[in-house]
Amino acid sequence: MLVYFFGSGSADGTREMKGVLGGKGANLAEMTNLGVPVPPGFTIACSACLDFLRGGGTSAALKAEIETNLARLEVTSGRTLGDPKNPLLVSVRSGAPVSMPGMMETILNLGLNDRTVIGLAQQSGNARFAYDSYRRFLQMYGDVVLGVPIQDFEHLLKSKRLTTDAATDADLSEDSLRNLVEEYKALVRTRTGAEFPMEPREQLQGAIEAVWGSWKLKKAVDYRRQNSISESLGTAVNVVSMVFGNLGDTSGTGVAFTRDPSTGEKRFYGEFLVNAQGEDVVAGIRTPLPIDQMETRLPKAYAELLKTQDRLEQHFRDMQDIEFTVERGKLYLLQTRTGKRTAAAAIRIADEMVAEGLITQREAVMRVDPEQLDQLLHPVIDPSARAQAIATGLPASPGAASGQAVFDPDVAEQRAAEGIRVILVRDETTPEDFHGIVASRAVLTSRGGMTSHAAVVARGMGKCAIVGCKEMEVDLEHRSFHVNGITVNEGDWITLDGATGRVFSGDLPTIPSDVVRVLSGQRRGSDSRVYVTYARLLSWADEVRTLQVRANADTPHDARVARHFGAEGIGLCRTEHMFFEGDRITGMREMIVARDEGGRRRALAKLLPMQRGDFEGIFEAMDGCPVTIRLLDPPLHEFLPHGGEDTKRLARTLGISRDELNRIVESLRETNPMLGLRGCRLGIVYPEITEMQARAIFEAAVRARRRGIDVQPESMVPLVSTVKELAHQRAILEHVADQVMGAMGEEMPYSIGTMIELPRAALTADEIATAADFFSFGTNDLTQTTFGLSRDDAGRFLPMYVEAGIFPEDPFRVLDTVGVGKLVKYAVTEGRKVRPNMKTGICGEHGGEPRSIHFCQTAGLNYVSCSPYRVPIARLAAAQAALSLTD
């Protein structure tokens, strides 16, 4: 069975069948079964799309199923497709198992032709409406199915408005629309060399195949890649009896949310238009009215809509995004789905639904996308900035963003790739602009409402957005916009305040968000609703997660920030980063250019107090938590200048000739430094480096301990490939520890482990475990060495690999569980055969990525470590990983 019917109060499907019927089809079936007023129709399963895209076409069996359900639809609706007196008209819409708003195609009013339009006019008693519906159908079908550029139709429509003095499309007369229909048909004839298809069944087959084909549109592929949606899902096709919101002042259409998608407030929120079809609202073609004004314009339908939206939220137990149409006073629901929302809204909705008894705390934890929490940490415009807003629009998605104004999505993508911050400015966005929205810091439109394409997509991505800025006149031809006597050209800087809808000229300063200010002690937590709900959600997450979350931090300041965000230790302190500041780099360079061990030791003696001070500060910030300190890792040449004035100044500082310095630099140059003299190899060739770092670690630990700080030092040896390397460095660390503790009269526990970042280390983990107290997987380097890829160079071709489906994801962003993950699991298993209680963790960039964290949970790791600002994300992701494996 590939076709599922719904109508007359019953449906062949349910909401549990999203994988078969797609989200839209499953929810249409569910609403029908609930008795919600839904126009009848049928859904073609997602698998038919995949068969079609594989070259299978439309089988005879599927065509027969479609015909059977079409006949059933004709009986249910009392109308017949193609009947010139009583025509059935249908919409043909996409609907994937995962919501992809606006990314695939829709065709409305299908079934109209030169004969049925007359029947529709007679049936409705409104010839203007009939020809308006016909011209809409010609435009949508011509664009989606026949490939006639939408701009060509829009050009004819705009010309018709100008020549008839019509202010809007709704002001066009019946005669103007009749003429426009003929012009549209002539346009199709000119562009395609064929007449517009008049046979409704031919129209239907063409529309179904076009919707299937839209799964492969660039905008759809980009959206799936951006949101990590599988390419193997396909889309369902929903064929639904048309209901019309453009039948006059007793009709209308709208989009609404059961709660505010921007703030999460529990209030019915949305927009509608009288005498309009659905695309007028979603596409931002006309600026709609607030939903509460519907109470006076369409009171009976509004009352029923209020009851229905509450019923749907109670049934689905989540905030719903609904589309509806009112046809001559009667309400119809066209869609319901889980609504996209901002991070602030997500945590508030989850929090309040727990308080209402609608969901449990565990469900609340699972409801919030961990990546969304990043939005709560974004800066906001500094209120002390003295700037006058040049325009104000609708605050569609919060946050503050500054960038250069650009007016074309391709330009936005190109400039962003060059490292330029941009803001995309449009009259209104369409799904074809998606790649430009991804590349931009924010979106600004002159038209559209809070439920327009730009608003919905930006909210879902956590992008700042301001829409419906009516004062603004966008001039795409000259790439500028004009507002209140001010002209902003492409490349000019603007700043958007998505919380208030204000637009400013220039690049305004920002301050930390409420959450960050509370965590850093700049504001009381009780004063911030967002912080209170954020803290409560993460406390629920902490109750259920089993993975510890540590932070990668190299300075006392970073350690304090990490602790504020809830880090339970330092999983990676990169000691080399401490040497790149101020005078420290000079001491490091002295050590590198020293002619003998004595010279190196003298230089290292200067560095010792600097490192010791940093370590002591980090131990203090992490009082009671483990701190893993990695010994020096990068090749030495990274600390030296490579020509120019820097070389001249350094030679003078070190008291050597410039030629001699150049010779030293050249002698350190390596063909492949990533696999050269670095990591534990440095400590073996120059053991005095390891000695100095060990002394700094243990002296700092004892000094901090004497001040009452609970110190838990963990020394980590990098880039080990054989147990003998680790044993060599461990011996030095233990010898220095004994010296320091003996001299300072203090005993304290400590541990010594290694980074597993080479395949050989993973494969010989049982041997290495004999000399290691813990393993920390450096998945950045482990990914490089497993794939044979250089992170610094692979960016040239990795995007193409992902786009072509060779790699499912960028392996430096999302952990490769098949290859790298297999090495991690093997090393954990083998290591614990030797040390059953061995602590294992991950400290690459993957430690803050939710899907990679889920793998760490399944692999049995003890902790993940990530950058400080990713700690909240990791805490929530770790909780979700734990729940997904137990529920």
Image (cartoon, rainbow, N blue to C red):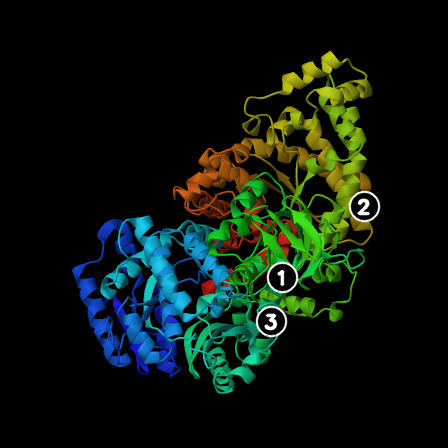
Ranked by sequence position, the earlier of labels 2 and 3 is 3
Question: Is residue 631 toward the left or the right of residue 307 in the image?
Answer: right
Q: Give yes or no for contact between labels 3 and 1 (Cβ–Cβ under 8 Å).
A: no
Q: Nearer the viewer, residue 653 or 252?
A: 252
Give how far across and how far down residue 542 sits, in percent: 60, 64
Residue annotated with mark 1: 469
Q: Amino acid at mark 2?
A: Arg
The reply to whether residue 253 is in sight is: yes
Q: Is residue 366 above or below residue 641?
A: below
The quadrant in which the C terminus is found is: bottom left
The quadrant in which the N terminus is found is: bottom left
Which residue appears at 29% of the width and 68% of the height? 111
- The Cα atoms of the two marked residues, 2 and 3, are separated by 49 Å
Question: Is residue 467 toward the left or the right of residue 162 in the image?
Answer: right
Please identify the quarter of the rendering in which residue 599 is found.
top right
Q: Is residue 743 above or below residue 432?
A: above
Name the element at disc 1. Answer: loop
Task: Check residue 703 in the rendering and tell me which mark sits there, or answer none.
Answer: 2
Give how far across and how far down residue 68 sits, in percent: 20, 71
